[in-house]
Image: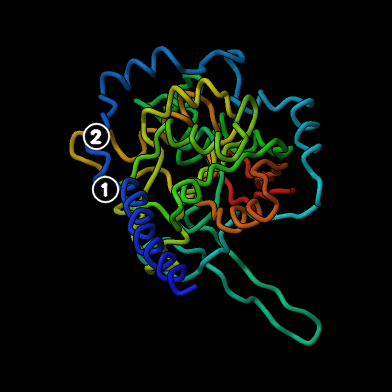
């Protein structure tokens, strides 16, 4: 028995360093040989893999066209246990390094007959608000989704006269698929600067037994909020993991309808790399994919692990804001 205990101790001492070494490959420094997308390649993609005109010259909903009645029925068939999970971060009215534009919230009254409060989102696209981007939010050289010139259609006086968030008033219901890359790699969260590649995404698909397809919502988690819990607040414009720009053609091939994430790009970025929002802006403007920014996917990841499945019905109900460029949202996953 004593010899068996010693053998077990010896094995433990051997195995533990191996686990640490495996995890060490998932750092930004381990990706030194991973090539960057050049500006020339990026410009070529703008011309050759965009979705402009695919659903007509006047289209304002992009890849939401892929969410057919059959896709919604498929999504509904995934509801087996009836458990619901929010993908939204709680609104935060405290300014911090990772939330420089908090919401304004205050009580209006509190009396024996009732109470009322007031809330204002000073920055709908802010770092602390889970929100969905409309196509009137970001542009390339003055052109928004479907080649629309923003000069006369998005103004300070009138807002977004086309491609506004109001096009999503009837809500979004589709199949959601979680890509939990920290779980794939056996870590709590990825390190800043790590670029998640197509190989990472497809390794997750093989492990989880699911893959995103036409009309689906892809939810990508790198562990932003888990890192904040462990290490405290940090500036996500300076420290974040994210999807590598080489994923862009893969997103087009998969024909997803929605892309949700915790942060819009990896940082720090090397000097010869594209800007932080390169993939964010390409997905929104060239592919017509609406984006759910600043999601909190930790509870979703935990419930998916309990349910042992990473696909679910997803519902999103943007606020009906005329001429708005985005909206706060509380996406709900239903297992």
Q: Nearer the viewer, residue 244 or 295?
A: 244
Number of on-image labels: 2
Examine the rendered structure and indicate whether residue 172 appears above or below residue 331: above
Is residue 170 toward the left or the right of residue 184 in the image?
Answer: right
Residue furthest to the left in view is 271
Residue labelled with disc 2: 273
Tell me what residue is drawn at x 46 percent, y 67 percent.
4
Residue labelled with disc 1: 268
Label 2 residue SS: loop
Q: Nearer the viewer, residue 109 or 92?
A: 92
Where is residue 82 shown, x and y percent of the image?
Answer: 81, 52
Work out whether mark 2 precedes mark 1 in sequence or the reverse, and give the earlier one.
1
Q: Which mark is residue 102?
A: none
Where is residue 243 shown, x and y percent of the image?
Answer: 41, 38
Q: Nearer the viewer, residue 169 or 334?
A: 334
Examine the rendered structure and indicate whether residue 108 appears above or below residue 320: below
Examine the rendered structure and indicate whether residue 288 appears above or below residue 122: above
Separation of disc 2 and disc 1 at Cα? 10 Å
Tell me what residue is drawn at x 35 percent, y 44 percent.
266
Q: Residues within 10 Å of mark 1 (few under 14, many from 20)?
A: some
Tell me what residue is drawn at x 48 percent, y 33 percent.
154
């Amino acid at each position: 028995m004593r010899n068996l205990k010693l053998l077990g101790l010896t094995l433990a001492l051997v195995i533990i360093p191996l686990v640490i070494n495996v995890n060490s490959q998932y750092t930004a420094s381990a990706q030194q040989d991973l090539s960057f997308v050049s500006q020339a390649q990026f410009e070529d993609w703008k011309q050759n893999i965009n979705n402009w005109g695919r659903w007509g010259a006047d289209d304002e909903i992009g890849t939401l066209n892929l969410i057919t009645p059959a896709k919604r029925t498929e999504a509904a068939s995934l509801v087996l246990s009836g458990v619901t999970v929010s993908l939204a971060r709680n609104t935060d009215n405290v300014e911090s390094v990772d939330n420089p534009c908090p919401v304004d919230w205050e009580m209006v009254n509190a009396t024996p007959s009732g109470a009322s409060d007031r809330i204002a989102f000073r920055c709908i696209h802010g770092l602390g608000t889970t929100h969905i981007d409309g196509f009137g939010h970001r542009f390339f050289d003055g052109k928004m989704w479907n080649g629309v010139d923003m000069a006369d259609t998005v103004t300070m006086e009138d807002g977004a006269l086309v491609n506004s968030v109001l096009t999503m008033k009837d809500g979004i219901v589709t199949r959601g698929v979680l890509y939990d890359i920290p779980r794939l790699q056996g870590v709590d969260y990825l390190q800043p600067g790590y670029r998640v590649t197509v190989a990472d995404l497809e390794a997750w698909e093989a492990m989880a037994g699911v893959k995103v397809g036409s009309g689906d919502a892809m939810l990508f988690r790198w562990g932003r909020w888990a890192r904040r819990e462990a290490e405290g607040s940090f500036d996500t414009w300076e420290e974040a993991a994210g999807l590598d720009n080489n994923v862009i053609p893969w997103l087009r091939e998969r024909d997803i309808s929605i892309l949700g994430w915790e942060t819009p790009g990896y940082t720090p970025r090397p000097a010869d790399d594209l800007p932080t929002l390169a993939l964010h802006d390409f997905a929104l403007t060239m592919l017509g994919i609406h984006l759910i920014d600043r999601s909190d996917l930790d509870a979703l990841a935990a419930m998916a692990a309990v349910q042992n499945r990473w696909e679910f019905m997803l519902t999103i109900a943007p606020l009906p804001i005329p001429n708005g460029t985005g909206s706060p949202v509380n996406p709900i996953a239903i297992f």
